[in-house]
C-alpha cells in the first residue's frame, strides 16, 4: 500500500506549536490514528525496536510521530514529564479530527514514549481507546531512577547527557553538543562526568534526581502511580527480562488487571532495553526470541480500533532456560516457594545455597576497595545489558559466591524472586549487589536476575530481584553472587568499606503449581 508523509502541526491551549510527521495510507479511509510522542527527533520514531511508521500506516492507519514540547522542531521548553498529561490529551483530541480519521486513537512506543502514553491516558481524552506501553516506570523513583534505594548511575547519567546534548543542539550551542556527545562515549571511565553535565546543563533533571535521594513529593508529583486510580483502558504491556524498567512494566500490568474493565495483556521477552532480538548479552536465545511485537500490536489495534475479532493471552513470558514462550493465565503469585539458605564457614570453598538452614548466623565479610571496585557486567541496569559469562568475576575474593548442589531434576521458576539479607557495616549506609546466575556443568556462569539495594548501617532487608522466567536443567547449579560495588551501574563508594553478612535466604517462585495455558 502506498504511504505518503507530511508535516502536521497544531497549537496547544497555551499557544505552543507541536510538530509531527503524518504517515497516510492511500485511499479514502476513514482510518484509526496511531500516535507516538517522543523527545529524540521524530524521524527516529523508535525504529531501533519497532517497524518504520510507514509499515504501520500500510496496515490501514494514520500514523503520527510527534516531537514533544521543546524537542525536535516543536516549540516550548522541555521539562522532563511535566507537560505530558495536558499536551498528550490535546494531541489526541487534535489527531482524532485529522482529515481521514475515524476519530479513534491508539498509542504505542517504549521508554519515554511508553511514559507519554501513560500520561496521555491519565488525561482521559475520549478518543483514546487503547495504548501499548513498553518498558516504562509505574513509580518514577522506584522503577527508573533508583532501585531499592540505590541510584542507577550509569543509565541515568547517560540519558541525562543525551537529553542535554539534544537541547544544546536545538539552542545552537554546537560546542556544548559536541562535548556532551563525546563525553557520552566515555561514561564508564570516571564518575566525574557528572561534573561536566553540571557545567553544560545546570537545569538538567539529573541534578534533581541526585538531590532527591528519598521518595519524596518531587517523585510523587511526576510518577504515573499517583494518577492512574481512575484509568480504564485496554493495554498491551511490553517488557524485557533484562530491561531496567521491567519492575514498572509488571507493576502497571498487575494494577491495571485489578482495576480495569478492559483486557490487559503482558509480554515479557528475553530482551534488554534495546534492541529486541534473539542475541542478548553473550547468549543467543534462538529464533523464537526475535521480536514479533509489530505484528502483535497491529492485531491489538485491529481489535480495539477496527473491531476485528482477536484473542490475546494474559501473559506471554519467554523462558530463558528452555528458550521458548510460556503462557500464563495470571501472574504467578500462588506458586510453590522454593527457599535456599546461605551457609558458610567463612571460606569461599564452603559457601553454599542449601534447602536447609544449617547456621544460626553467617560470618562472611566483604571488603570494598574503591581503587579496585567490582566492575559491572551485564544485568538489567546497564548500557551493556544482558547475560554474560562471569566466571572471571566470581573468582574475586570481594564477591561472596554461594552455590547450590547440581540439580537432580529441572527447576522452573517464574515470577518474583526475593532475597532476605542481614548485613552490617561501620559506614552510615552502603550498597549491596546481588546477582543470581546459572552455573553450567562445563563451569560457565551466566547471570539471569539481579538487584541493587541500599542498606542502613545495620539492617535486615527483604530485597526484590528482577522478576524472571527460567528453567534450569538437570546438572545446573544456582549461583548467588554478592558484592559491595558494581561500577558504573551504581555509584562508586569512595572509601574503604567492610561489610559483614550475618544471614541470608533466597526465595524462588517454583511454577510447577501455577496455572499455565
Image (spheres, grey):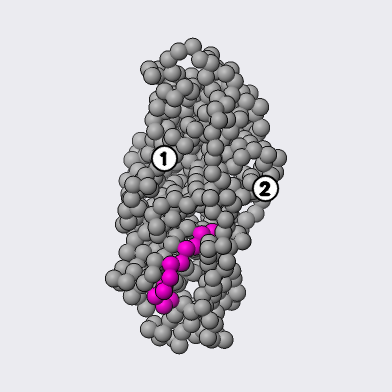
Q: Nearer the viewer, residue 383 or 101?
A: 101
Residue located beneath label 2 in the image:
258
Q: Residue furthest top?
A: 28
Q: Residue 397, relative to residue 170: is it above or below?
A: below
User: Residue at left 69%, top 44%?
Assistant: 259
List x then y, in percent, for residue 14: 62, 25
User: Residue at left 67%, top 47%?
Assistant: 258
Q: Nearer the viewer, residue 369 or 316?
A: 316
Magenta stretch, residue numbers: 404-416
Say left or right for 62 vs 406. Answer: right
User: Residue at left 47%, top 28%?
Assistant: 65
Magenta: main secondary structure equals loop
User: Residue at left 33%, top 50%?
Assistant: 286
Dot 2 alpha-carbon crowd within 10 angstroms: few under 14, some 14 to 19, many 20 or more? few
List x then y, in percent, for residue 316: 50, 48
Q: Residue 404, relative to residue 344: is it above or below?
A: above
Identify the mark at residue 292; answer none if there is no mark.
1
Say left or right for 466 vs 15. Answer: left
Say left or right for 81 vs 42. Answer: right
Q: Nearer the viewer, residue 45 or 499?
A: 45
Amino acid at each position: 500500500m502506498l504511504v505518503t508523509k507530511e508535516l502536521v502541526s497544531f497549537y496547544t491551549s497555551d499557544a505552543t506549536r507541536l510538530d509531527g510527521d503524518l504517515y497516510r495510507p492511500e485511499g479514502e479511509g476513514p482510518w484509526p490514528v496511531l500516535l507516538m510522542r517522543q523527545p529524540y527527533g521524530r524521524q527516529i520514531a523508535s525504529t531501533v525496536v519497532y517497524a518504520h511508521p510507514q509499515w504501520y500506516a500500510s496496515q490501514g492507519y494514520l500514523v503520527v510521530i510527534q516531537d514533544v514540547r521543546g524537542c525536535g522542531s516543536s516549540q516550548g521548553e522541555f521539562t522532563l514529564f511535566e507537560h505530558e498529561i495536558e499536551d498528550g490529551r490535546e494531541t489526541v483530541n487534535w489527531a482524532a479530527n485529522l482529515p481521514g480519521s475515524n476519530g479513534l486513537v491508539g498509542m504505542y512506543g517504549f521508554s519515554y514514549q511508553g511514559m507519554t502514553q501513560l500520561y496521555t491516558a491519565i488525561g482521559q481524552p475520549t478518543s483514546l481507546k487503547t495504548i501499548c506501553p513498553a518498558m516504562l516506570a509505574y513509580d518514577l523513583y522506584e522503577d527508573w531512577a533508583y532501585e531499592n534505594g540505590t541510584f542507577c548511575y550509569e543509565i541515568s547519567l547517560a540519558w541525562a547527557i543525551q537529553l542535554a546534548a539534544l537541547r544544546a543542539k536545538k539552542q545552537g550551542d554546537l560546542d556544548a553538543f559536541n562535548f556532551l556527545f563525546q563525553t557520552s562515549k566515555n561514561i564508564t571511565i570516571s564518575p566525574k562526568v557528572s561534573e561536566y553535565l553540571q557545567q553544560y546543563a545546570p537545569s538538567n533533571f539529573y541534578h534533581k534526581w541526585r538531590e532527591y535521594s528519598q521518595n519524596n513529593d518531587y517523585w510523587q508529583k511526576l510518577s504515573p502511580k499517583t494518577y492512574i486510580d481512575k484509568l480504564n483502558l485496554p493495554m498491551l504491556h511490553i517488557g524485557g527480562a533484562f530491561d531496567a524498567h521491567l519492575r514498572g512494566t509488571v507493576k502497571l500490568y498487575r494494577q491495571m488487571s485489578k482495576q480495569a474493565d478492559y483486557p490487559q495483556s503482558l509480554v515479557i521477552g528475553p530482551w534488554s532495553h534495546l534492541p529486541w532480538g534473539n542475541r542478548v548479552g553473550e547468549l543467543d536465545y534462538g529464533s523464537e526470541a526475535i521480536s514479533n511485537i509489530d505484528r502483535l500490536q497491529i492485531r491489538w489495534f485491529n481489535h480495539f480500533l477496527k473491531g476485528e475479532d482477536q484473542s490475546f493471552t494474559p501473559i506471554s513470558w519467554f523462558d530463558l532456560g528452555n528458550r521458548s514462550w510460556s503462557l500464563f493465565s495470571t501472574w504467578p503469585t500462588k506458586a510453590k516457594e522454593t527457599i535456599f539458605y546461605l551457609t558458610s564457614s567463612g571460606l569461599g570453598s564452603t559457601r553454599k545455597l542449601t534447602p536447609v538452614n544449617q547456621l544460626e548466623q553467617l560470618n562472611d565479610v566483604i571488603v570494598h576497595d574503591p581503587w579496585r571496585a567490582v566492575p559491572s557486567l551485564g544485568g538489567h541496569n546497564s548500557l551493556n545489558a544482558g547475560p554474560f559469562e562471569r566466571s572471571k568475576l566470581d573468582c574475586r575474593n570481594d564477591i561472596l559466591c554461594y552455590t547450590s548442589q547440581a540439580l537432580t531434576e529441572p527447576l522452573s521458576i517464574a515470577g518474583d524472586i526475593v532475597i532476605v539479607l542481614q548485613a552490617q557495616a561501620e559506614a552510615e549506609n552502603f550498597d549491596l549487589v546481588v546477582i543470581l546466575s546459572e552455573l553450567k556443568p562445563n563451569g560457565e556462569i551466566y547471570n539471569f536476575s539481579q538487584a541493587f539495594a541500599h542498606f542502613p548501617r545495620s539492617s535486615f532487608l527483604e530485597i526484590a530481584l528482577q522478576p524472571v522466567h527460567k528453567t534450569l536443567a538437570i546438572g545446573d547449579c544456582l549461583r548467588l553472587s554478592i558484592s559491595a560495588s558494581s561500577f558504573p551501574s551504581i555509584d562508586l563508594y569512595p572509601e574503604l568499606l567492610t561489610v559483614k553478612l550475618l544471614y541470608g535466604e533466597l526465595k524462588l517462585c517454583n511454577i510447577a503449581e501455577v496455572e499455565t495455558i
